């Protein structure tokens, strides 16, 4: 990881992660989660990604993350040679080397055989690769437990990697941070920045280490004696009549093989040109407002017993493409055409005006592929049918014009195609002839991947240099700022000291003035206080005097009041005495009257008593007379009643006799 030290702490800002697994879609899932986009889902790349490593990078959690997705290396049907080529491709895409290899595995599809293959592949990266490896399982968590029960191959592998298991968990938003944290921890433990895969560095004699039995991984041996001698020497020079593996296991590179990369703006006719060369509609070509070809694509054909590979690219130098995408496509197309292209063809459209972008394409190619790349560059015009009666030379214009400058920069190599005449194979064989001439002029060399890597390394060096320079510049600026700050601080301190002195003097003066004022104030206040005290004394005396007067007045009043009260009480006593005499006399008089009255009443009582006794005697006499009268009346009444009864009995007797008589009659 490229590191940056900020305020004493180390942070990693660039990480290259190789995803190694058996299952393409699971690898894609993990890659997309790491990058936070659906970068690996595109249908267009699926068939390609099943045979090649695909590198996609992006900015994630303030880091630049490059994911090199490699899902074909663990396929059982691959030959050892194909595995070596695949690892080489992966290493080249993760140049200068991967920081971490994540093994994307599934418990339900991992055998001991797979484990051995994993170890072989890791060894091919480097002997130390296993220490940079994290095992990640993507099985659903609920199934993991059961899988583990009957398959402990992954666990054994984890133990061999000296690490622990990382469970893939898309539901956990912190998963990616956790993964990056573990990666950083692992790298810190290993005290290494990335895996140094030196076996794939080109040697001075043009061979690479996987072709050197002494330096290649012990378990994978060369599968063909022919391959023991390299077909390339330094800077891509070809050793005639020798064969070596190239870009996949099936094809074999021969000395007369031809590898072509088509570059140019969108819509100029790159895909049509590729189809014309191949003699079939291998690439999609269409008239459209937006770019038709979205990703680099490689196709091969046999032309006059020559194995020709054509790489069609999207409009790489169009301004609307992001730098990241351009960089990815360039790395992709170079790794598609290992060991490197013989020619870069800048495709221009005769029917369109030569644009400013096209004029600067030489510069862009130089910046992208390095200074030497122009030796391997030529211009191809499409729409030759638009020339009509004109010759191409008439169309090109005068020397010094932008188009001629471009052609000159490309060693005056140009060609015209009429892509509507695909059956005209002479235009193709003429092109191949021009390319062959160029290759010959270049001493039978091609633009090798080593050049690209060197150029990339140079670029990185340059960037590093620029970075170092920037850091130095920043340090210088910081030092200057510090110095300036120190000077400013000094002058500020001096100024402050002077200001301070001035201020001190001013304050002393102010203090003195204040002191004077204060003393004066104190005097005035004391005078005032003295006056106030005198005033108060005077007021108190006055008050005492008034109090005394009041007291005397009160005593006087009390005396008068007492005198008055005494007089009043004497008078009252006198009056009370007189009243008592009067009352005595009245009482005496009243007692005499009372005695008189009592005597009178006693006399009256005696009289009444006498009368009452007489009355009672009379009433008793009357009652006796009345009782006698009543007795007499009662005797009388009894007598009458007796007479009445006799009379009634006589009458009854008479009536009975009368009735008796009447009956007898
Ligand atoms: N008349 C004529 N038309 C051509 C010729 N070459 C290409 N065209 C047309 O130009 C259009 C664009 O061609 P493509 O090959 O798709 O262009 P491209 O550069 O691959 O475009 P992108 O993939 O979008 O970058 C198509 O309609 C082609 O038929 C030519 O030589 N003559
Ligand atoms: Mg195209």
Image: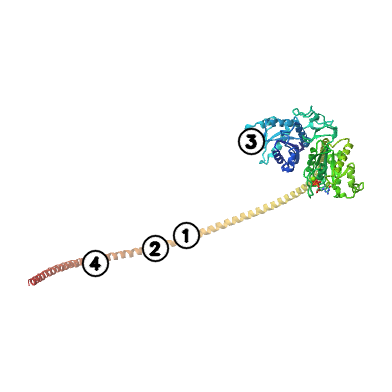
In this orientation, which residue lies closer to the viewer: 641 or 182? Answer: 182
Mark nearest the camera among 3 and 1 is: 3
* N-term-proximal mark, 2 vs 4: 2
- Distance of label 2 from label 1 (alpha carbons): 20 Å
Q: CA distance from mark 3 to mark 2?
A: 135 Å
Front-most of residues 355 and 642: 355
User: Which is in the foreground here, disc 2 or disc 4?
Assistant: 4
Secondary structure at badge 3 equals helix
Cα separation, mark 2 vs mark 4, equals 40 Å
Q: Which residue is the extreme one toward the front?
A: 423
Q: Which mark is residue 453?
A: none
Whichever of labels 3 and 1 marks the residue nearer the N terminus, that label is 3
Mark 3–mark 4 distance (CA, rounded to whole Å): 147 Å
Residue 625 in percent (x, y) is at 17, 68
**Badge 4 element:** helix
- Give the mark nearer the N terminus: 3 vs 2: 3
The circle drawn on residue 611 is 4
Disc 3, disc 1: CB below 8 Å?
A: no
For the question of whether residue 465 can be seen, the reply is no
């Amino acid at each position: 990881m490229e590191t940056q030290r900020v305020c004493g702490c180390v942070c990693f800002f660039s990480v290259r992660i190789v995803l190694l697994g058996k299952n393409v879609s699971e690898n894609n899932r993990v890659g997309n989660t790491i990058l936070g986009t659906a970068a690996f889902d595109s249908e267009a790349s699926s068939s390609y990604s099943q045979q090649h490593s695909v590198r996609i990078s992006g900015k994630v959690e303030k880091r630049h993350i490059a994911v090199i997705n490699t899902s074909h290396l663990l396929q059982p049907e691959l030959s050892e040679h194909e595995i070596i080529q695949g690892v080489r491709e992966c290493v080249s895409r993760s140049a200068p080397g991967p920081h971490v290899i994540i093994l994307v595995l599934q418990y339900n599809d991992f055998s001991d055989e797979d484990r051995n293959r994993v170890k072989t592949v890791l060894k091919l990266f480097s002997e130390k690769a296993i220490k940079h490896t994290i095992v990640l399982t993507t099985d659903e968590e609920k199934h993991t437990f059961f899988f583990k029960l009957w398959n402990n191959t992954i666990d054994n592998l984890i133990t061999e990697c000296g690490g622990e298991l990382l469970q893939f968990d898309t539901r956990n938003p912190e998963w990616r941070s956790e993964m990056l944290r573990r990666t950083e921890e692992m790298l810190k433990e290993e005290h290494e920045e990335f895996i140094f895969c030196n076996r794939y560095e080109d040697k001075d004699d043009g061979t690479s280490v996987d072709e050197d039995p002494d330096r290649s991984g012990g378990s994978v041996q060369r599968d063909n004696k022919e391959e023991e001698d390299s077909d390339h020497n330094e800077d891509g020079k070809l050793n005639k009549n020798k064969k070596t593996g190239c870009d996949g296991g099936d094809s074999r590179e021969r000395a007369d093989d031809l590898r072509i990369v088509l570059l140019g703006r969108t819509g100029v006719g790159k895909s049509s040109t590729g189809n014309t060369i191949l003699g079939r509609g291998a690439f999609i070509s269409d008239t459209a407002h937006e770019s038709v070809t979205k990703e680099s694509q490689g196709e091969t054909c046999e032309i006059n017993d020559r194995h020709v590979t054509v790489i069609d690219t999207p409009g790489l130098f169009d301004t609307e493409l992001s730098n990241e995408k351009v960089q990815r496509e360039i790395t992709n197309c170079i790794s598609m055409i290992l060991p490197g292209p013989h020619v870069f063809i800048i495709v221009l459209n005769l029917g369109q005006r030569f644009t400013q972008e096209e004029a600067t394409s030489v510069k862009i190619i130089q910046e992208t592929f390095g200074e030497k790349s122009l030796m391997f560059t030529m211009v191809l015009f499409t729409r030759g049918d638009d020339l009509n009666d004109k010759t191409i030379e008439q169309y090109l214009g005068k020397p010094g014009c932008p188009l001629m400058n471009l052609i000159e920069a490309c060693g005056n190599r140009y060609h015209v195609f009429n892509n509507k005449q695909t059956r005209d194979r002479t235009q193709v064989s003429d092109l191949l002839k021009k390319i062959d001439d160029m290759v010959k002029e270049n001493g039978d060399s091609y633009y090798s991947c080593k050049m690209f890597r060197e150029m990339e390394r140079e670029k990185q060096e340059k960037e590093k240099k620029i970075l170092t320079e920037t850091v130095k510049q920043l340090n210088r600026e910081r030092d200057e700022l510090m110095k300036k700050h120190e000077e400013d601080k000094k002058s500020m301190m001096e100024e402050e000291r002077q200001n301070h002195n001035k201020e001190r003097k001013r304050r002393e003066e102010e203090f003195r003035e204040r002191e004077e004022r204060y003393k004066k104030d104190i005097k005035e206040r004391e005078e005032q206080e003295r006056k106030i005290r005198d005033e108060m004394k005077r007021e108190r005396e006055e008050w005492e005097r008034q109090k005394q007067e009041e007291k005397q007045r009160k005593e006087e009043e009390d005396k008068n009041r007492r005198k008055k009260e005494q007089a009043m009480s004497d008078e009252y006593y006198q009056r009370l005495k007189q009243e008592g005499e009067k009352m005595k006399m009245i009482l005496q008089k009243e007692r005499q009257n009372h005695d008189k009255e009592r005597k009178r009443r006693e006399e009256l009582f005696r009289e009444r008593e006498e009368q009452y006794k007489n009355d009672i005697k009379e009433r008793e006499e009357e009652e006796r007379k009345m009782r006698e009268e009543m007795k007499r009346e009662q005797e009388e009444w009894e007598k009458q009643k007796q007479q009445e009864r006799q009379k009634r009995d006589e009458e009854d007797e008479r009536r009975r006799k009368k009735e008796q008589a009447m009956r007898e009659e």
